[in-house]
Image (cartoon, helix red, strand yellow):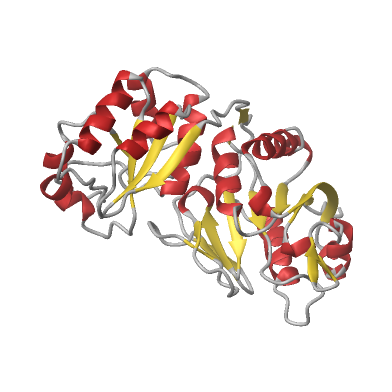
Amino acid sequence: MKQRKPRILVIGTGGAISAKTLHGIWKYGEMKQEELIDMVPEIRHKFQIKTLDLLRIDSSDFTPDHWLTLANTIYYNMKDYDGIVVTMGTDTMHFADTAISFLIQNKNIPIVFTGSKADPLSPSSDATRNLTDAITLAGTSDIAEAVIVFDGEVFRAARTKKINASEFRAFGSTTVEPLGKVEQFIKLKGPYRKRSKCKPALYRKLDIDVAIMKVYPGFDGNRIVSLINDGATGIVIEGFGLGNLPLHNNAVENAIKYANKKNIPIVVTSDCILGEYWQEIFEAEVGSRIKRLKIIHAYDMLPETAYVKLMWVLGQTRKYEEVKKMMQKNYVGEISEYKKGKRKH
């Protein structure tokens, strides 16, 4: 009996991987996904591939509305395919794939994001290699998560950010090791969610008025107040080190109290890698300083992930205690459980 080829849907949204150079300028989405697949014809020998050109934009122009459109498109096609590949630009890929992580939960197949740093017609382009790797992972691996496949590595979506603007190694994980590699063979390291026959869950709401900001020496707490007065419904603050805030005067503390009064959640993340021993030193270095503040600490969650997650959480509830509980709960591998004074094994 002839074995059925894995069915893969490739969804194009633009970016360098679908760009053509016209008069020295990239035109995103000018190359359709069918044309891309035709550049690696041998891939069709192993997979049954369908394509959909959904958007034709630079990923810098992606908005939360685009994430919702993409989530709907993926969700309503999942039942017909063994894996889904999304091609897009690299600038905000780590925001989009994180949004899909939260908007589509209980996944039963791989949702693989990829792109390229050079347009596909460039002599040294990484486009066809990344596309081939992404399709191969989507069609043959047992993972059932949203991931990025880029430059031969596999990253969990909600733990990944763009780390290099010009080289092929565009993405990295600052909190955990990559999930695996795609070379001659696919090598994945657990734990990760595996394929199943479960029914995925689609969420249709995001609060688009969430803001993100970075503290700096001399930071004025009035920046927080201004965001709230301008309509921010939640704020992610990228703090120093383990998530420390400048408390040398009362400005930041008063701003946080103002946010509390307005029922605006303040989520604090870190501007750096927390390192292997963060759980042992958190209380000594930061805990005593922030105990009097009504904030939500995101521990080792990436700032970009916390921003997207808070949009998702506030789309479900505005009750502060529920928001805090959800922000500190692990849904898609985005955060480590914090055990006071203990290292997580």
Q: Disc count in the image? A: 0
Could you tell me residue 147's position as x and y percent?
58, 52
Could you tell me residue 263's position as x and y percent?
36, 20
Residue 77 location, quadrant = top right
Could you tell me residue 216's position as x and y percent?
30, 53
Q: Residue at x 65, y 39 (%)?
A: 67
Q: Is residue 118 above or below residue 228?
A: below
Of 148 and 316, the residue lying toward us? 316
Residue 21 location, quadrant = bottom right
**121 lies left or right of 232:** right
Q: Residue at x 52, y 69 (%)?
A: 164
Of 103 and 133, the residue lying toward us? 103
**262 lies left or right of 276:** right
Q: Residue at x 54, y 45 (%)?
A: 98
Residue 105 visible from this viewpoint: no
Residue 311 visible from this viewpoint: yes
Of 180 and 306, the residue lying toward us? 306
Q: Residue at x 47, y 29 (%)?
A: 230
Of 191 and 64, the residue lying toward us? 64
Q: Is residue 323 above or below residue 28?
A: above
